[in-house]
Image (cartoon, rainbow, N blue to C red):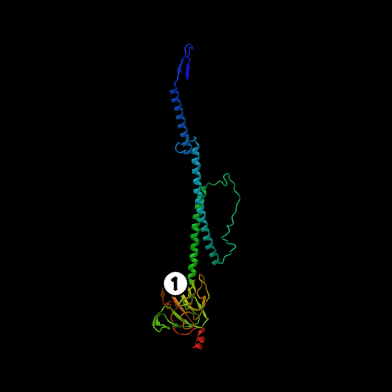
């Protein structure tokens, strides 16, 4: 292989030749360059992070901004969802309280329907930005609404408390006997057990009477037991305000259910002879915070005097 060089004056020329060894070296260099380029392109293709490409000016910044906006929107949507759930729970609570107050005050259910939106109106107002509230504005408005609901809930709770306290004051004070007719057959304290003949503590008082006669609640409250109980036979237990509970045992039949609200003087059972009993009577207990108390403090003076319609019936039995 040879190269011919022609100078500018075109009068002289020079010839340069290459040897076989020079040509071999040149070919080897070209081969190495090609192989190196191929390896580099392959690594870029399989692992772009190794040789990152230069980003197109402006595109990367726009992508980052779009991603940030999307993440912010997702966070705001999650916050909106949580606030809606909280507001809905408060609205449900206000509805229940309001309905109780409406019933207690004997108001018109149609006029004060809390489950329907209140009547509202007014001329339509149009603006250029109608319906274009920002999410942040919505969050702010919902936060204000939440505060308003909290204040209204406090007002409703106060009204409910006043109503319940009034009811408790009239209905839930323990007093009186658990029967309308009968006599005291066993007092509170140590006595001779009627089955064993041994001294034993009697944790209530017994009122004997005509089987099937009414057993009444001595205070308003909620029924926490209604049915069979070991030793008590058929029994009713009522929870009252102030940590008090009363029990009415050995009933022939139970007239109430667990969870039922009862008023003072309401019949809760009929007098019977079930359980550990020697004859028709009601075993009456008073407890406060789980501790047995002497019912005489709430009944008043106790004696064996017959009273009510039981006088004639009991005398005929004995």
Question: Which residue is the site of mark 1?
Answer: 244
Say which residue appears at 50% left-offset and 40% top-offset: 63
The answer to whether residue 113 is above or below residue 49 is below
The answer to whether residue 4 is above or below residue 173 is above
Q: Toward the viewer: 68 or 20?
A: 20
Q: List the single residue furthest toward the right.
A: 123
Image spot of residue 214 (x, y percent): 52, 79
Q: List the single residue furthest toward the top.
A: 11
Say which residue appears at 47% left-offset and 33% top-offset: 38
Image spot of residue 234 (x, y percent): 49, 77
Image spot of residue 134 (x, y percent): 53, 46
Local SS, label 1: strand
Total numbered labels placed on residues in the image: 1
**Neighbour tally class for label 1: few under 14, some 14-19, many 20 plus, Cα within 10 Å:** many
The answer to whether residue 159 is above or below residue 195 is above
Image spot of residue 157 (x, y percent): 49, 62
Q: Toward the viewer: 193 or 25?
A: 25
Say which residue appears at 49% left-offset and 67% top-offset: 164
Say which residue appears at 50% left-offset and 43% top-offset: 67
């Amino acid at each position: 292989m040879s190269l011919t060089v022609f100078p500018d004056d075109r009068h002289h020329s020079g010839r340069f030749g290459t040897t076989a060894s020079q040509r071999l070296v040149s070919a080897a260099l070209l081969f190495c360059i090609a192989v190196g380029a191929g390896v580099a392109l392959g690594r870029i293709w399989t692992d772009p992070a190794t040789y990152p490409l230069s980003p197109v000016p402006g595109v990367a910044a726009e992508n980052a901004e779009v991603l940030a906006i999307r993440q912010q929107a997702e966070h705001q949507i999650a916050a909106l969802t949580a606030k809606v759930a909280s507001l809905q729970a408060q609205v449900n609570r206000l509805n229940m309280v309001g309905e109780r107050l409406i019933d207690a005050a004997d108001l018109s259910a149609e006029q004060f329907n809390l489950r329907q939106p209140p009547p509202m109106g007014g001329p339509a107002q149009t603006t250029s930005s109608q319906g274009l509230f920002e999410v942040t504005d919505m969050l702010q408005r919902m936060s204000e609404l939440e505060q308003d609901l909290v204040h209204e809930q406090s007002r409703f709770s106060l009204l409910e408390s006043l109503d319940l306290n009034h009811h408790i004051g009239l209905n839930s004070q323990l007093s009186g006997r658990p029967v309308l007719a009968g006599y005291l057959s066993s007092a509170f304290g140590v006595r001779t057990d009627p089955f064993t003949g041994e001294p034993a503590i009697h944790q209530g008082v017994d009122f004997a009477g005509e089987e099937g006669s009414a057993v009444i609640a001595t205070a308003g409250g909620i029924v926490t037991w209604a049915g069979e109980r070991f030793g008590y036979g058929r029994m009713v237990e009522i929870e009252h305000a102030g940590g008090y509970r009363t029990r009415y045992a050995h009933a022939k039949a139970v007239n109430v259910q667990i969870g039922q609200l009862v008023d003072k003087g309401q019949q809760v059972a009929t007098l019977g002879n079930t359980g550990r009993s020697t004859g028709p009577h009601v075993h009456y207990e008073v407890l406060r915070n789980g501790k047995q108390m002497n019912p005489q403090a709430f009944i008043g003076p106790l004696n064996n005097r017959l009273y009510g319609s039981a006088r004639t019936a009991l005398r005929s039995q004995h």
